[in-house]
Amino acid sequence: MSHEDRSALVRLGGASYRYRSGRPGVGRVTLDVDAGERVVLMGPNGSGKTTVLRLITGELRPGDGSVHALGHPAASLRAGHRRRMGVVAAESVHVDPLPAHQNALFFAQAAGLSRDGAEAAVHELFERFGLAADSDVPPSEYSYGMRRKLLLVEALAHEPDLLVLDEPFLGLDPSARSALLDIIHVRASSGAAVVAALNGAADALALASRVVFLMDGEVVADDTPDALLERLAKRTLITIEVDGPPSRDADYPEGVTVDETAGRLLAISEFGPGVLPALCQAVLATGRAIRSVRVKEPDLADVFAHLTGQPLAPAAQSEDPSLPGAGQ
Amino acid sequence: MIGLIWSLEWAVATRRRRLFGLNALIPLLLVGPIAFSGAPAQHAAAVYTVLFTIFGAFGSCIPLIRDGESGLLTRFMLAGVPPRSLLTQRVLAATSLDTVQLLPSLIVIALASGNAQAFGGVLAALMLTLLVANLLGVWAAALARSVAEGALFAAVSSLLLLHAAGAFRTPAPGTLSAGVERLVPFRLLHESLLAAEGLSPPGSGADLLPPILVAAALALVTIAGGRRVAVGAV
């Protein structure tokens, strides 16, 4: 490998994969993840995030193109190289009926830690993730979130050089989320590479040094979070709940696109939240009363919708409306 | 790392006390009545050989398929457990566990036969049978797409090999069947059980070697298959 290649702990070169049923997984994905990078894959369900992760871990062999992890072809990684990886899959699979502590010790030792080293690492992580009091309980008696925490302990105990995480924040309480973010940032600053598949825009923003948007198995955008958000720089969504029917006579400020339904007004401002006073005055001038006002700055989900015309998550799952993404 | 899977298998088995107990008790429920019923030794030996072989094959095949379906085998391999080591330790652990669980049945047979000193040889033959049966189970799991298929493959392959081993009939000397019979490892258990009943002389060293070599070859091929065999079960 060249000097530039040496730092790339993950390299996908036009990799594609199609499942046995014929369903496309990913199509010609090119992606490098260097040491110290924290790359987040974002996209709706079925966009190929998990497929990319499984290509990186070597579970899947690419139909076309190449996938390298830790400097070697991923599909034929030897056990010694695999021990430098920490993998959190979407499913929480453990060795029942062994207690959680014994599960974690097993995976830590399988990854190459000595018995004493594994005990110390597991103990610390159990404390950080709030599992210490339940360490003698088998995973089958754990809640969903506790099983996810156990997976994280098992993936992190041996301080891997490459973290491959599928929805790592799923099921975590706020303190565990905070602990995980802290650990990931510390590992990355020590030179580990992180590749994570996430649906949550807030989690992605907290974790990522780079975000890759996937849609229908292809890379739509690959950039830092700040650069991606800059594409919607001042675009702000303002939601105003009003008393009264929609008005045709309202004189809304320039640079504001308004969509009215009964009792609700969605306004997209191209000039940021500064238009709020003028917008509210325009509403009041129509004789309607304002019941509430919400201002939403663009997030990564909005950028995704803006770039692809598709929402990151189905509308029913969102608590707030997103900035519409149709067209640019 | 050495012995990690072995330790894991024993830890899981001893935690599942009910299952462990049932695995010891259920063969005993079959063996006991036959051993003390005065059944013809030839028939009893055939039943015991079939029972112990199927016990080993199923006991290897079904957990392997279930662990493959659940994703546990994949987790092991992603965690850095070499597939060959995984298979080797799993087969050896299963063979030793099967031996322990079948010991009560063997003791009952020895007591009923009144020829306890012959049972050192029976025990050795049992362990070889269980090793081969567990290896058969691994292949059945690698080829099957479900637990039902795996059970079918394990049962059919075991019964065919038991037939080839002469458990159900004695082939005429000098025939191809007799030649095949010499090689099949299950023959040793069947013959040692018959010998314990005084029905046939114990085999000579030359007679012991071919089936042991076949068992060793099967073990090597299975382990060399490594990832393909383990992934086939995934």
Image (cartoon, rainbow, N blue to C red):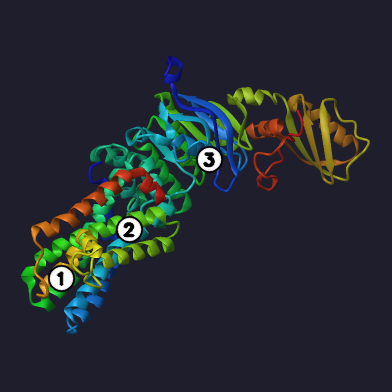
Residues B137 and B106: in front is: B137
Query: Which residue type does callout 1 highlight?
Result: Leu
Q: Are marks 1 and 3 in contact (CB under 8 Å)?
A: no
Q: Quadrant of the N terminus of chain A?
A: top left
Residue corresponding to mark 1:
B193
**Residue A274 image offset from top left, x and y in percent:** 76, 25
Q: Quadrant of residue B126?
A: bottom left
**Residue A248 image offset from top left, x and y in percent:** 93, 38
Disc number at residue A50?
Answer: 3
Assess disc 3: are there few (<14), some (14-19) or many (≥20) residues with their C-alpha within 10 Å of its C-alpha: many
| Residue found at x 71% / y 31% | A306
| Residue found at x 35% / y 47% | A132
Sequence-wise, which precedes: disc 1 or disc 2? 2
Query: Which residue type does callout 2 highlight?
Result: Gly
Q: How far apart are labels 1 and 3 at the CA level?
A: 55 Å
Q: In front: mark 1 or mark 3?
A: 1
Residue corresponding to mark 2:
B137
Q: Is residue A296 visible?
A: no
| Residue found at x 49% / y 28% | A38
Q: Left or right? Give the position of B151 relative to B107.
A: right
Q: Point out the residue furthest to the right here.
A: A249
Residues B208 and A64: in front is: B208
Q: Left or right? Give the position of A148 relative to A138.
A: right
Q: Is residue A281 visible?
A: yes
Q: Are marks 1 and 2 in contact (CB under 8 Å)?
A: no
Mark 3 secondary-structure assignment = helix
Q: How far apart are labels 3 and 2 at the CA level?
A: 32 Å
